[in-house]
């Protein structure tokens, strides 16, 4: 009867592979942030567009809401609207 101390499984370390995955994820996040910033420029005159949100249907705890993001160019007057959904509200009201 004896405990075999020599037989201990060591989990393989992620090592360099894990670092590469983390580095690629950071690069993808930075690229997406850059795309988002570029989208705020006017497609016609390249001026910086103003962004405003307009709520079409407010979100409830049960259903998602609908909002419109409006990009407006103060220089040439061009504008574009993009609908997007907002997640259901997490705040539970004093129901029942
Ligand atoms: Zn413009």
Image (cartoon, rainbow, N blue to C red):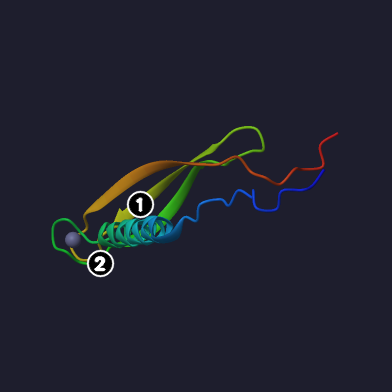
Give the alpha-carbon distance from disc 1 to disc 2, as whole Å.
13 Å
In the drawing, does residue 82 fall left or right of residue 48?
right
Is ligand 1 closer than 8 angstroms to the Cβ of mark 2?
Answer: no
Q: Nearer the viewer, residue 92 or 32?
A: 32
Farthest residue, direction right? 96
Res 63 quadrant in image: top right
Classed neighbour count for the residue bearing mark 2: other residues with Cα under 10 Å, few (<14), some (14–19), many (≥20): some
- In the rendered image, the quadrant that contains the C terminus is top right
As helix, strand or loop, the secondary structure at mark 2 comes to loop
Label disc, if present, on residue 70 of the rendered structure: 1
Residue 18 % position (x, y)? 43, 56
Label disc, if present, on residue 89 of the rendered structure: none
Residue 4 % position (x, y)? 71, 48
Farthest residue, direction front? 1
Label disc, if present, on residue 48 of the rendered structure: 2
Vertical relation: 34 (above or below) 86: below
Farthest residue, direction left? 44
Which mark sits nearer the N-terminus, 1 or 2?
Answer: 2
Residue 90 % position (x, y)? 67, 45
Q: At x 21% / y 54%, what residue is drawn?
A: 78
């Amino acid at each position: 009867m004896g405990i075999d101390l020599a037989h201990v499984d060591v989990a393989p370390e992620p090592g360099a592979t894990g670092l590469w995955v983390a580095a690629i994820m950071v690069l993808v996040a930075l690229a997406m942030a850059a795309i988002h910033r570029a989208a705020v420029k006017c497609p016609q005159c390249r001026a910086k567009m103003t962004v405003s949100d307009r709520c079409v249907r407010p979100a409830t705890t049960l259903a998602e809401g609908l909002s419109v993001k409006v990009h407006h160019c103060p220089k040439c007057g061009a504008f574009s609207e993009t609908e997007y959904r907002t997640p259901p509200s997490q705040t539970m009201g004093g129901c029942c």
